[in-house]
Amino acid sequence: MESITHRKRILVAPLNWGLGHATRCIPIINKLIAHNFEPIIASDGFALELLKKEFPNLKAIELPSYNITYAKKANSFKLKLIKDSPHLLKTIKKEKKAIETIVQKEHIAGIISDNRFGARHKNIPSIFITHQLRVLSGNTTWLSSKLHQKIISKFDACWVPDHSGVNNLSGNLGHAESYKTPVKYLGPLTRFKKLDLDIKYRLLVLLSGPEPQRTYLEEKLLKQLKSYKGQVLFIKGQVEAEQQTTIEDNITICNFMTSKALEIAINESELILSRSGYTTIMDLAKLEKKAFFIPTPGQFEQMYLAKKLDSEGVVPCSKQDKFKIKMLDKAKDYSGFNSIESEVDFNALFEIFRA
């Protein structure tokens, strides 16, 4: 086998917006290693910390932070994004300069960017991962989708973590006609496997996402769960230096879990209560779980996915301000997820980096 010093180095750069972009890069990183590449991780914040814990032996580099936060009120979400856009554009410029330095210093042979707009280089293959070929933004969807497509067109290829056919998870988000950039469908990306384990928790609460909405939901759920009967595992989604666990009556509370522990926890849980983030949907589909979704207020993508799965009879949902713990009983009338297996030829997929 080639020594690691002669392996081609691939920079894997997920966006730090919740944990989903980082976690769905985990199977990609593992496949790169299995195909004799040397991944280097680049991100910031919780996303970077999570990947450093998952891959302590890989080099990790901090990139400029987009500092994406949500408005306190859902109806101010779009306005806040517009207000923050000058900062975002400046950060992307800083990111591009940082990438140029990293490519030269670390002898990078290719880049895989999960929604980091500046993580590309004109002289090496640069791949963009997204499940949003269409970016929903209400009455400006046409504009946000066009702008997103323009950004993606600067990359050499676009990888979509979903099935290409009608039995897909992303719906209108990940399927668009006449796309300029070459699009390849990978099938859902997840770090988890379905395990045959006894049920330990009646409910698993799985939080993630930008502030302040993550904290708002955490506080709301902890209050309501005081009257809940049955064992509860509550994972806050806050990646810190050490894992911390506390037990309050029937509720076990963790700040975060690494992949293996979380894989076991989800398999041991009867029902999952979480945001309707796309990575969470891919994970729960693989593990064939029942769930209840509370989309992040103001985030059109999560609202669309939650409504889609509710209308299909797969997973019920509720707005955050309307949610009551008794609503979880609705889940028994929904089918839950069924996994659709897919095989990806990663050897062919990674050929772009061998050229």
Image (cartoon, rainbow, N blue to C red):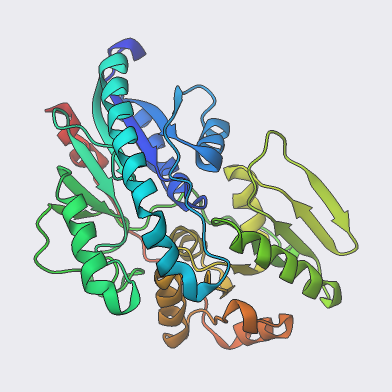
Locate residue 275: give its quadrant.
Answer: bottom right
Residue drawn where x is 28% and y is 12% of the image? 6
Vertical order, 261 against 139 (above or below) = above
| Residue 156 x %, y % | 14, 42
**Rendering coords of residue 301 (x, y %):** 39, 69
Q: Nearer the viewer, residue 113 or 298?
A: 298
Instruction: Report x, y in % for residue 292.
Output: 59, 75
Please give left or right for residue 179 compared with residue 70 in the image.
left
Q: Answer left or right for 198 relative to 185.
A: right
Quick one: 46 or 87, which is closer to the camera?
A: 87
Q: Position of residue 224 (x, y in %)?
A: 78, 75
Q: Is residue 73 left or right of residue 221?
A: left
Does residue 337 appear in the picture of this structure? no
Quarter of the image holding residue 205?
bottom right
> Image height check: is 172 above or below 55?
below
Which residue is rendered at x = 24% and y = 36% of the image?
A: 120
Give the camera-side residue of 36 and 84. Answer: 84
Query: Where, by quadrant of the figure, is residue 223 drawn?
Result: bottom right
66 relative position to 130: left or right: right
